Image (tube, grey):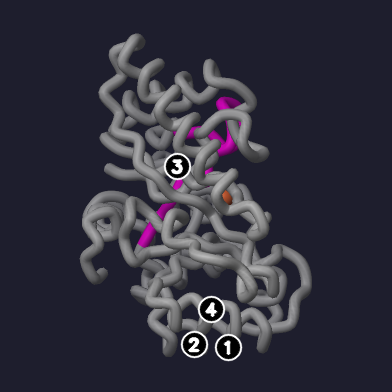
Amino acid sequence: MTDIHNHILFAIDDGAHDIDTSVEMCREAYENGYKAVVVTPHFANYNHIDEFVNERDYKISELQKALQVEEIPLTILRGAELFLSDALMKSGNIDDLTINNSRYMLCEFPLGPFNIKRGLMWIDELIERGYTPILAHPERYYEIHRNLHIIDELLDRDVVFQVNIDSLTGKNGSTAQQLSIDMICRGFAQLIGTDAHDLKYRHTRIKEKIKELPYEIDHDIFVKCVKINSQKVIDDEEI
Ligand SMILES: [Fe+2]
């Protein structure tokens, strides 16, 4: 399995606070069946892309060294979670923020209210620049709950959807749970991520979460979303 969305990388966003936490999250990911994780720290400051990329890459190399010492053979790949905004339109080159140098870009909408037309414009901008947006946790957005037609609009635009495993198990409320199940079962959403932030609540112990999955998410669907499709993303293949 490959986790396509998490905040395992230390001291760069609201995820792991220090390198020891990162290492433990990696250990648990590996012990729970992950062979690789794409680290996707939050990124919103488009005036300082280079600083962010340098810090991320330095911390990845530090984490890789620590994993070697601890003999945890988990592969760490580069990524980011882009907060979509008007600033993105004015930004410079964001190629270094793709997932593993592929066409795929993990991005998120504001969780609260936002202008839908503008949201679709941000997505169109990414596509025009040659990226394939992966929208993180579509089931969690207030605006999507209020305007389900946005999902059709996004599907017309060749957007990939990634749902959070915590939404499928009901931890993000019943609306997010039902929407995430529907999107997976209809084939709209193709990826399931941990969006792990820590060791306690949003963690990488996926075996515990699998036990809580609703019956609709059967073994074949699960494998497709956490293994087959995530492999295609990191190999830069079409899903
Ligand atoms: Fe995230």
Secondary element under disc 2, as helix, strand or loop, is helix
The disc, 3 or 4, on the residue closer to the chain's N-terminal end is 3
Secondary element under disc 1, as helix, strand or loop, is helix
Q: Main secondary structure of the magenta part?
A: loop
Q: Amino acid at mark 1?
A: His
**Residue located 34% across and 74% down the image:** 187
The disc, 2 or 4, on the residue closer to the chain's N-terminal end is 4
Hey, which quadrant is residue 197 in on the image? top right
Mark 2 vs mark 4, foreground winner is 4
Q: Amino acid at mark 4?
A: Ile
Label 1 sits on residue: 149
Point out which mark residue 152 bears.
2
The disc, 1 or 4, on the residue closer to the chain's N-terminal end is 4
The disc, 3 or 2, on the residue closer to the chain's N-terminal end is 3
Image vertical order of residue 120 relative to residue 95, above or below: below
Q: Which residues are magenta?
A: 191-204
Front position in the image: 189 or 52: 52
Front position in the image: 165 or 174: 165
Look at the image and tell me in which quarter the C terminus lies. Answer: bottom left
Q: Position of residue 118 (x, y in %)?
A: 67, 84
Q: How many marks?
A: 4
